[in-house]
């Protein structure tokens, strides 16, 4: 049985300062140096989001990467500091991976929502989670979804993110037959492909050698290589005429890397546009899908971080869990209002905990570094997709490791988990993957006559997803 560390205390030799008393630094067996060091390490462990979020969201029409980078840093900094001050827990916040992909590749993709309309759905998802926290209903919803189906959702998002990364880097490309293939005619060609390969290999080697910030170093090193290549090769952007060109961004040095941040994404939100365009049922399911992809990870993450830091009570729950969950839900709202997608808790906070962070003071350090990074937003425009997407592929691996927690010998959960995982990348939709998992789980339980195993909330959600899958024909029928 896994041993859970519990909170430890340490009596300070000197008189407790106001800072020490507020954050309970000595009480938790920490010190000022450890908190500062942990906060810095956490920032570098998760700062790749400052590059990845703009790369993903720039696919949505009319979104400037530098503005997204500045907004990402601003909201992450503010919400991370709020988590530290309010909840006094070493858990940093930033735009959530998977949620940003859903914005770019589902909401602003096949569903044809504008960026502002997509941010409106992010806002309402945050409002819903906040209500669930304040009413105590969040725990009820959490218990309604089978735990292994939650794991499958996370794994599926990881596979989806990795697929997006490979496609954006040009490593996997669409063809007529077969539908996709490796590179160009089954081979990797061109300097950009080399940049991706070098970046991914660098990240992997650093990770297995347990180097902190492996993902960020991988992005930085491959970007440097790309800039050097571009100085001599002068490659164009990727197109039918130049299939070996750069993807989303051409890595060339222009102007100063430091600038006054642009906050063009702030307030770029349409609260009700999606309701008019898609209808209430479709929006309800989309908001629910966003909610699933968002808050389940946070509950698992806060327990994992709390266990590593020795901050769990005898029941294995952080002492201020309600405050932690409330800040997390408010972060989703802030992400929508800030136009940078939902913010959520980052498991990379464990890197800071490993360096000694035990209190919210580490969050203050991490948050301040995020705020300072706003002034370096132009650097994002230098990073080519071939360098940035190495992080998507690697984060996909990290999320995929959870697949071992699924009982593959039990078909009642294995089949829904499988369908959840494969439908996300194959349909290019997180929502479809979640829906397929829920609906298949629902029918398998019905087929086995296990009606009592189906939570009332699962009945409702499964029926709504069934309607969602045939929404087109239903709308046509109603229209006729």
Image (cartoon, helix red, strand yellow):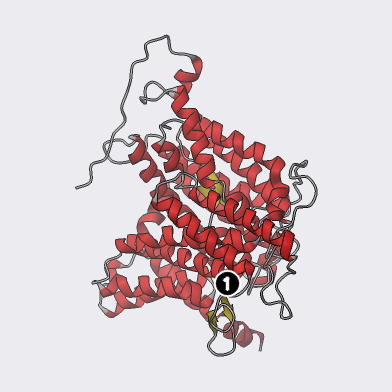
Observer-nearest residue: 186 or 469?
A: 186
Position of residue 162 measured from the top left corner of the image (x, y, whole percent): 50, 66
Q: Residue at x 53, y 42 (%)?
A: 44
Observer-nearest residue: 218 or 130?
A: 218
**Taking 255 as reference, is 229 above or below it?**
below
Observer-nearest residue: 113 or 198?
A: 198
**Taking 416 as reference, is 312 above or below it?**
above
Q: Quadrant of residue 78?
A: top right
Which residue in the protein does label 1 denote? 167
* Residue lying at the far top of the rendered structure: 15
Q: Residue at x 41, y 9 (%)?
A: 14
**Taking 112 as reference, is 253 above or below it?**
above
User: Local crowd at mark 1 within 10 Å, few (<14), some, or many (≥20)?
Assistant: many
Assign the C terminus to one quadrant of the image. bottom right
Question: In the visual, does 418 lie left or right of 292?
Answer: left
* Residue lying at the far right of the rendered structure: 255
Position of residue 390 measured from the top left corner of the image (x, y, whole percent): 54, 60
Quick check: can you spot residue 244? yes
* Residue lying at the far left of the rendered structure: 1
- Could you tell me how many numbered marks the image carries? 1
Position of residue 206 measured from the top left corner of the image (x, y, whole percent): 45, 51
Q: Residue at x 47, y 64 (%)?
A: 157
Quick check: can you spot residue 119? no
> Helix, strand or loop at disc 1?
helix
Position of residue 193 measured from the top left corner of the image (x, y, whole percent): 59, 69
Q: Quadrant of residue 252?
A: bottom right
Observer-nearest residue: 40 or 313?
A: 40
Q: Residue at x 48, y 21 (%)?
A: 22
* Residue lying at the far front of the rendered structure: 232
């Amino acid at each position: 049985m896994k041993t859970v560390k519990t909170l430890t205390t340490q009596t300070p030799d000197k008189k407790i300062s106001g800072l020490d008393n507020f954050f309970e630094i000595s009480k938790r067996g920490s010190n000022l140096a450890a908190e500062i060091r942990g906060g810095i390490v956490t920032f570098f462990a998760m700062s790749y989001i400052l590059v990845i979020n703009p790369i993903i969201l720039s696919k949505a029409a009319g979104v400037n990467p530098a503005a997204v980078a500045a907004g990402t840093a601003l909201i992450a900094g503010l919400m991370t500091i709020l988590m530290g001050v309010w909840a006094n827990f070493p858990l940093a916040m930033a735009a959530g991976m998977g949620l940003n992909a859903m914005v770019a590749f589902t909401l602003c993709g096949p569903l044809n929502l504008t960026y502002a309309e997509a941010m409106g759905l992010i806002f309402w998802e945050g409002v819903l989670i906040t209500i669930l926290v304040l009413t105590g209903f969040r725990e009820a919803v959490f218990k309604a979804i089978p735990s292994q189906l939650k794991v499958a959702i996370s794994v599926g998002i990881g596979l989806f993110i990795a697929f997006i990364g490979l496609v954006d880097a040009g490593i996997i490309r669409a063809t007529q037959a077969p539908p996709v293939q490796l590179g160009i005619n089954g081979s990797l060609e061109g300097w950009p492909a080399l940049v991706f390969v070098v970046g991914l290999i660098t990240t992997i080697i650093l990770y297995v050698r347990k180097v902190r910030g492996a993902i960020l170093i991988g992005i930085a090193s491959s970007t440097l290589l790309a800039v050097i290549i571009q100085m001599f090769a002068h490659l164009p952007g990727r197109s039918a005429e130049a299939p070996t060109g750069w993807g989303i961004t051409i890595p060339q040095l222009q102007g100063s890397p430091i600038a006054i941040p642009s906050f063009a994404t702030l307030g770029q939100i349409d609260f009700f546009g999606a309701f008019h365009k898609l209808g209430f049922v479709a929006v309800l399911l989309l908001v629910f899908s966003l909610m699933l992809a968002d808050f389940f990870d946070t509950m698992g993450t806060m327990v994992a971080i709390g266990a590593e830091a020795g901050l769990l009570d005898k029941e294995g729950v952080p002492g201020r869990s309600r405050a932690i969950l409330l800040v997390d839900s408010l972060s989703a709202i802030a992400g929508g209002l800030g136009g940078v997608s939902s913010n959520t808790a980052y498991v990379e906070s464990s890197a800071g905990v490993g360096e000694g962070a035990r209190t919210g003071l580490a969050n203050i350090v991490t948050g301040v570094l995020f705020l300072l990074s706003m002034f370096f937003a132009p650097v994002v425009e230098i990073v080519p997709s071939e360098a940035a997407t190495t992080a998507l592929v690697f984060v996909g691996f990290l999320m995929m490791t959870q697949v071992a927690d699924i009982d593959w010998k039990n078909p009642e959960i294995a089949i829904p988990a499988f369908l959840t995982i494969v439908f996300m990348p194959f349909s290019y939709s997180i929502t479809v993957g979640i829906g397929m998992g829920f609906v298949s789980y629902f029918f398998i339980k019905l087929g086995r006559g296990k009606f009592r195993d189906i939570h009332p909330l699962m009945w409702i959600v499964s029926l709504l997803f069934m309607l969602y899958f045939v929404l087109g024909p239903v709308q046509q029928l109603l229209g006729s």
